[in-house]
Image (cartoon, helix red, strand yellow):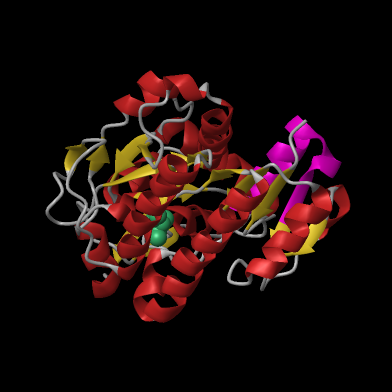
Amino acid sequence: MKKILVTGAVGQIGSELTMELRKRYGNENVVAGFHRTKPGETLKNSGPCEMVDCTNIEQIKEVVKKYNIDTIYHLAAILSAVAEAKPNLAWKVNIDGLYNVLEVAREYGCAVFTPSSIGAFGESTPLDNTPQDTIQRPSTMYGVTKVAGELLCDYYYKRFGVDTRGVRYPGIISNETLPGGGTTDYAVEIYYEAIKNKKYTCNLGKGTYLDMMYMPDAIKAAIDLMEADPAKLKHRNAFNVTAMSFDPEKIAASIKKVIPEFVLEYNVDPVRQAIANSWPNSMDDSAAREEWGWKPEYDLEAMTKDMLEVLSEKLK
Ligand code: SER
């Protein structure tokens, strides 16, 4: 029986992943680890919740011992735009935090899932159809921590036999918890604003293509990879995964099909734009497809339909 700890369980991905893991493995077998933000009613009432500051190794250890944890989904991280504003904090959380999790995993024999990101690439990477194995020289602190994190996870696998696995997530779009301080956040906000004001001012420019994914696929990717037969994995940290690639015009066009009066305007944020320009336009995720059967369910049209339906109800 799996005993799981999710760090960052209150975050954008963590909040929905924790609930899905509870559904699959039993409520009492999935611990929601939180730090700054306290868990809401849904997380609190459905299973165990514990304070886990990943920069505090003793706190991670205590929870792993208390619940006999064998699998850690390490979601606690600082996103790209915040990492540029607070590089020191990003290093502490994204690197020291991951190091602590890996050390605890080594000592207590846990498997570890760690998300990497499209941010692990940079200007010198081929940005169209970005290969699984290619140049990774990112120019952002976020990217530096993601590349180092991938290497560290591979090192713990090879050197200590820790079962580490990860994916390079694209921008994740969801309707429950908002993302905090990423470059791809516009693709979430645009849906909220389309419903509330029928208008959105985008902080990335026209023609900025980025990989994206709807939350149900992001959750499926994490769980499927952790369930995959290890004998089939040639890669571990981390797999390119994508579901769609679009620019602001394309997502706006898909919204206009449902809300014809929707208007898109631009007010480009130079920091986010520079970050986005250094990231892939579209990734090649064939290694994930071949090695563990990755296949997304949602394309842009299906996602837009679902997002607008769910949010229209929620924002009533
Ligand atoms: N969504 C993330 C960000 O924008 C990318 O990993 O920072």
In the displayed structure, would residue 268 be above or below residue 23? Answer: below
Q: Quadrant of residue 36?
A: bottom right
Q: Which residues are magenta?
A: 14-32
Residue 191: percent from the left, percent from the top? 49, 52
Instruction: Out of 276 and 131, give the one closest to the viewer.
Output: 131
Instruction: Out of 167 and 45, give the one closest to the viewer.
Output: 167
**Horizontal side, residue 82 vs residue 229: left or right:** left
Residue 192: percent from the left, percent from the top? 53, 57
Q: Residue at x 70, y 60 (%)?
A: 61
In the displayed structure, would residue 182 be above or below residue 89? Answer: above
Q: Is residue 261 at all visible to an observer of this figure? A: no
Instruction: Out of 88 and 15, give the one closest to the viewer.
Output: 88
Quarter of the C terminus within the rendering: bottom right
In the displayed structure, would residue 297 be above or below residue 275? Answer: above
Q: Is residue 146 magenta?
A: no
**Horizontal side, residue 53 vs residue 123: left or right:** right
Residue 118: percent from the left, percent from the top? 32, 49
Number of numbered discs present? Answer: 0
Q: Is residue 23 magenta?
A: yes
Residue 54: percent from the left, percent from the top? 60, 66
